[in-house]
Amino acid sequence: MKLVLRVCMLLFFSVPAVLASPGAVRCGKLVDVRTGKMLVDQMVVFDETGTITAVGAATSANLPKGVTPIDLSGSTCLPGLIDVHTHLTSDPNMNGYEGLGVSFPREAIIGAKNANKTIRAGFTTVRNVGAGGFSDVALRDGINAGDIPGPRMFVSGPALGITGGHCDNNLLPFEFHYKEEGVADGPWAARAKVREVVKYGADLIKVCASGGVLSKGDLPGTPQYSLEELTAIAEEAHKLGRKVAAHAHGTQSIKDAIRAGIDSIEHSSLIDDEGITLAKQHHTYLVFDIYNDDYILGEGAKVGMLPESIEKEKKLGRLQRENFRHAFQSGAKIAFGTDSGVYPHGDNAKQFAKMVEWGMKPIDAIQAATINAADLIGQPDKLGALEPGHYADLIAVSGDPLTDVKALQSVPFVMKGGAVIRNDAAAK
Ligand SMILES: [Zn+2]
């Protein structure tokens, strides 16, 4: 009886998220993210699998029988946004020593809260690059099963790193003998670690190539993994059909990671001209998290970040923004990633205005968070555009994000796979 009840409850709660019905959305305006054109009075039609079947002029739309379109004629539609660098299971208020008290199950629950905040902010897909205890795998699977609301997640599990490096944990003294589960030194240990995280559910591999800001005792500009180790990791991951994201602030590590064949450089803070040229030659995406500098310098001390972390950020923040502008203007491929979890989840879209302030047009920043991000994730035919064959992941805003990108900071309508997550727009 109890089991029957549980099965019934499961069916009841999973239906809306798992099974959609055919539907349509009428958009007053629609941003064509490939061309940057603003289209007017468009209809987006999708089927019961949550896949778009048609996009075109609303007046000539061929609607499936019985479908009444959701009326967003006063709004501007875009594809669901994508953030390729999140930490949904991290709480921005639990830093430094306070973070040591967070268990893996607790991390998963923190992740459930933040997954909801993130999708309600219009981010229907994220690439989560680093989480403890495979809490990100649990979160992804819970969302996919319809247990909790959240974005489509592509997850890395624990980040690979050297002993004592940015992706180890260096807060406790020797007698605790503590190390993070992603620590692996040497090419073969690193290959074994890739196999292990894939075994437990990782969609991609995250590796810490250089030092970092929010870690103790290391320097962001110095290399950690060697070229030999990075090459082994990239080779092993690609052999297993996984892409690799490398945390790299330092000039040398950025180049080593690109030469190793890694797919994206995270942070990219101290990239030089040679690094930019290499990124273009190797088609490597650069991800610059240029919003959170303001948050770390403004709020970091209050939320327990170590004094040394704040000092490191002071040295890096402005250089990273200048190098973002230079890399973009030099023609490097840029994907939108913010390092959410360092700053509060749900504020992801605040980075768009920074990207525009530092040299992009609004459409460039929007492309970074749609078609470019989809390409980096390896799903260019399913994500990042409102086109037949893509998931019906759609957001709507008031105003014109092509002239004022801050319009993306308030997203009243969110749909994922044809299922409406929030709709505060239709009445307006
Ligand atoms: Zn990160």
Image (tube, rainbow, N blue to C red):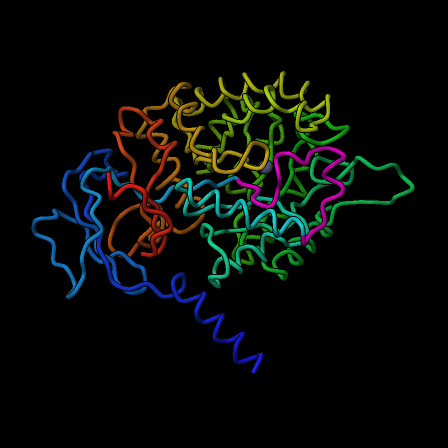
Q: Is residue 31 visible?
A: no
Place residue 38 in its image quadrant: top left
Q: Residue at x 26, y 30 (%)?
A: 399
Q: Is residue 92 magenta?
A: yes
Q: Which residues are magenta?
A: 86-105
Residue extending farthest bottom? 1
Left or right of 66, for residue 351: right
Q: Choose between 324 and 366: the one closer to the eye.
A: 366
Of 292 and 299, the residue lying toward us? 299
> In which quadrant will I find the N terminus?
bottom right
Query: Residue 302 placed where, x, y %?
Result: 66, 24
Q: Residue at x 48, y 63 (%)?
A: 145
Q: Residue furthest right?
A: 175
The image quadrant where one finds ligand 1 is top right
Prevailing secondary structure of the magenta residues: loop
Quarter of the rendering occupied by the C terminus: top left
Residue 124 falls left or right of residue 300: left
Residue at x-position 49% and y-position 33%: 287
Q: Is residue 217 above or below residue 61?
A: above
Residue 30 percent coordinates (x, y)? 22, 39
Spot occupied by residue 289 in the image (x, y as percentages of width and height): 51, 30
* Residue depicted at 64% across the width and 36% down the height: 209
Q: Would you say 39 lies left or right of 301 here?
A: left
Vertical position of residue 67 compared to residue 156: above or below: below
Instruction: Judge whether 406 appears above or below 21 on screen.
Output: above
